Amino acid sequence: MAKLRHIAMVVEEMEKTAQFYEKSFGMQRVRQTDTAIGLSDGVVSLVIIHPSNVNMKGDSRRGLHHLGFLVDDMDRESAKVEANGAVRHGGIIHSERGTETERKYRDPNGQVFDLTSPEYARDFWHIAV
């Protein structure tokens, strides 16, 4: 079964946004680059992305960018979402060990979401799996 564990949003003022979620909800900063700040409450990961982030690839949307679902069986859950109308979006991300960690999709309305392995969720999103 897939579980929602990751939300990404695109904003102009990353630091101000991060401080809001840290101060308001007690989220902890777990990663930071020039164009992204990762926060976690131990269960859900929130990534705050600046529009200049290279992974945006010209996408100028602001607000909700994508959702991430933790899955135990990547192939089974991929087959399920594809059977329900999801379309692959972008490539498959692999870890340094060569194992598959994430697949990106668009739902029937075009909303981007990820299916993510427990290893990636634990090591990158910093959440309990």
Image (tube, rainbow, N blue to C red):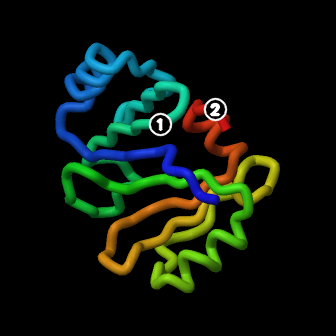
Residue 4 has which mark?
none
| Upstream in sequence: badge 2 or badge 1 | 1
Q: Is residue 116 above or below residue 40?
A: below
State if disc 1 and disc 2 touch (CB < 8 Å).
Answer: no
Name the amino acid, label 2. Ala
| Local SS, label 2 | loop
Vertical relation: 90 (above or below) 15 = below
Q: Position of residue 27 (x, y in %)?
A: 40, 21
What residue appears at the point 26 percent right and 46 percent down from the top-left corner? 10
Q: Judge the density around disc 1: few (<14), some (14-19), many (≥20) Cα neighbours within 10 Å.
A: many
Q: Where residue 47 sits: x, y (%)?
A: 40, 38
Give the structural element (helix, strand or loop) at label 1: strand
Q: How busy is the neighbourhood of tag 2: few (under 14 within 10 Å), some, or many (20 plus)?
A: few
Of residues 22 and 90, which is closer to you in this image? 22
Write the residue at 38% across / 56% down: 66
Q: Which amino acid lies under the numbered mark 1 shown in the image of this protein?
A: Ser
Left or right: 28 in relation to 22: right
Residue 50, percent across and down? Answer: 28, 42
Left of 17 or right of it: where is 118?
Answer: right
Give the position of the N terminus as an image quadrant: bottom right
Residue 124: x and y in percent read 60, 37
Quadrant of residue 113 within the rendered picture: bottom left
Residue at x-position 62% and y-position 42%:
121
Of tags 2 and 1, the one toward the viewer is 2
Q: Which residue is mark 2?
A: 128
Screen quadrant of the C terminus: top right
Residue underneath mark 1:
45
Mark 2–mark 1 distance (CA, rounded to whole Å): 10 Å
Residue at x 60% of width, y 77% of height: 80
- Number of on-image labels: 2
Residue 92, by quadrant, is bottom right
